[in-house]
């Protein structure tokens, strides 16, 4: 039985994760933490794995506290960049160097911008397709309670596509637009325009548009309900104990 702590337990995702853990026969919900609680206390609750769905401004400190507490982490919170990921990688390396044996297992942290299978596949397909199209843009659409823009998924999608375009030696995308208003062409993520829509009624959606003369490929993922993220989160909880160090992206657990 794996004991699980949930950070951000009072939030939209935290509540869904608590319910998913409570209904899984091989998992026990050891503790629920939210703003004002100390992440270092999760070990005392018996948790071997902690799940973090909090806010971009808090998640990195939470992860470092979890590593210090000797607890594996599964993180869905957005806001990560190469610098913050590098600090977690270094911290894990240092912490794991001093850990050995069954009583002191090697620690793992999984940080995934999106736990929904459709989104993970959409990102993968977008990266595969990117080298074959002159133009590419990303539109992400979310509920208006979302605090960050663009979404972590959109950033990850654009970065994967930009890397594929670079490797294929593609020229910058054609665009002769002279913008009268700043922001009209969206945010620039590694040369890929990313547009953020916030609309009441939405949950989490993304459309990737790829264009060539005379043709267009659209790749779309829709999370209509937060239950879409739960199989991925549970997979992360079940596997993180066997994945020492930092893993970025659920695709690595799906052998994609
Ligand atoms: N990776 C994925 O598949 C998904 C990621 N997300 C991301 O997860 C994060 C949370 O999303 P929601 O649940 O919609 O947000 P939310 O605003 O509903 O919940 C966040 C919760 O974290 C709590 N919190 C704030 N600071 C904290 C701290 N220091 N320690 C513990 N709890 C703290 C808040 O009080 C709140 O209850 C966002 O970054 C969002 O983008 C959301 C959905 C799926
Ligand atoms: O805030 C959300 O809701 C979501 N956040 C993640 C993101 O920023 O990509 C994942 C998903 O899109 C839902």
Image (tube, helix red, strand yellow):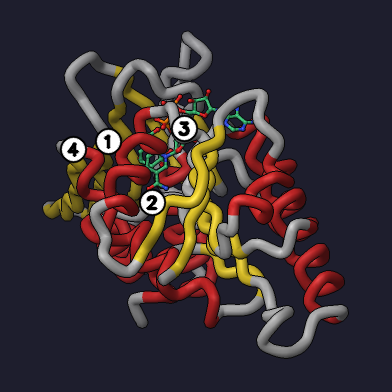
**Residue to which mark 3 is pinned:** 150
Q: Is residue 9 above or below residue 133?
A: above
Separation (CA) of disc 1 from disc 4: 8 Å
**Residue to which mark 1 is pinned:** 204
**Residue to which mark 4 is pinned:** 225
Residue shown at 21% from the left, 49% from the top? 228
User: Residue 216: where, in percent of width, then height?
Assistant: 16, 51
For label 3, being within 8 Å of ligand 2 is answered yes
Q: Could you tell which of marks 2 and 4 lies nearer the N-terminus?
A: 2
Q: Is residue 223 above or below residue 184?
A: below
Separation (CA) of disc 2 from disc 4: 13 Å
Sort mark 4 into few (<14), some (14-19) or many (20+) by Cα contacts within 10 Å.
few
Q: Could you tell which of marks 2 and 3 lies nearer the N-terminus?
A: 2
User: Residue 211: where, in percent of width, then height?
Assistant: 24, 51
For label 2, being within 8 Å of ligand 1 is answered yes
- Please tell me whether mark 3 or mark 4 is closer to you in this view: 4
Separation (CA) of disc 2 from disc 3: 13 Å
Residue shown at 62% from the left, 46% from the top? 80
Residue shown at 35% from the left, 29% from the top? 12
Residue 114: image tag = 2
Separation (CA) of disc 1 from disc 3: 12 Å
Q: Is residue 75 above or below residue 176?
A: below
Separation (CA) of disc 3 from disc 4: 20 Å
Separation (CA) of disc 2 from disc 1: 10 Å
Q: Are marks 2 and 1 in contact (CB under 8 Å)?
A: yes
- Please tell me whether mark 2 or mark 4 is closer to you in this view: 4
């Amino acid at each position: 039985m794996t004991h699980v702590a949930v950070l951000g337990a009072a939030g939209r995702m935290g509540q869904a994760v608590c319910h998913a853990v409570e209904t899984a026969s091989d998992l026990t919900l050891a503790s629920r933490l939210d703003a004002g609680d100390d992440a270092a206390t999760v070990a005392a609750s018996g948790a071997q794995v902690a799940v973090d769905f909090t806010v971009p401004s808090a998640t990195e400190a939470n992860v470092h506290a979890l590593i210090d507490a000797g607890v594996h982490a599964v993180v869905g919170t957005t806001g990560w960049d190469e610098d913050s990921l590098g600090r977690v990688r270094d911290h894990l390396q240092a912490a794991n160097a001093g850990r050995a044996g069954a009583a002191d297992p090697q620690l793992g942290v999984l940080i995934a911008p999106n736990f929904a299978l459709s989104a993970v596949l959409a990102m993968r397909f977008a990266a595969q397709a990117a080298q074959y199209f002159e133009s590419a843009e990303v539109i992400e659409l979310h509920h208006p309670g979302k605090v960050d823009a663009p979404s972590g998924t959109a950033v990850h999608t654009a970065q994967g596509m930009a890397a594929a375009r670079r490797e294929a030696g593609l020229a910058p995308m054609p665009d002769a637009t002279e913008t009268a208003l700043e922001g009209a062409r969206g945010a620039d993520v590694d040369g890929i325009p990313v547009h953020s829509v916030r609309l009441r009624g939405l949950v989490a959606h993304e459309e990737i548009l790829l264009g060539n003369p005379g043709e267009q490929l659209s790749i779309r993922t829709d999370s209509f309900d937060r239950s879409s993220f739960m199989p991925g989160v549970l997979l992360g909880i079940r596997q993180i104990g066997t994945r020492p160090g930092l893993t970025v992206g659920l695709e690595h657990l799906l052998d994609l």
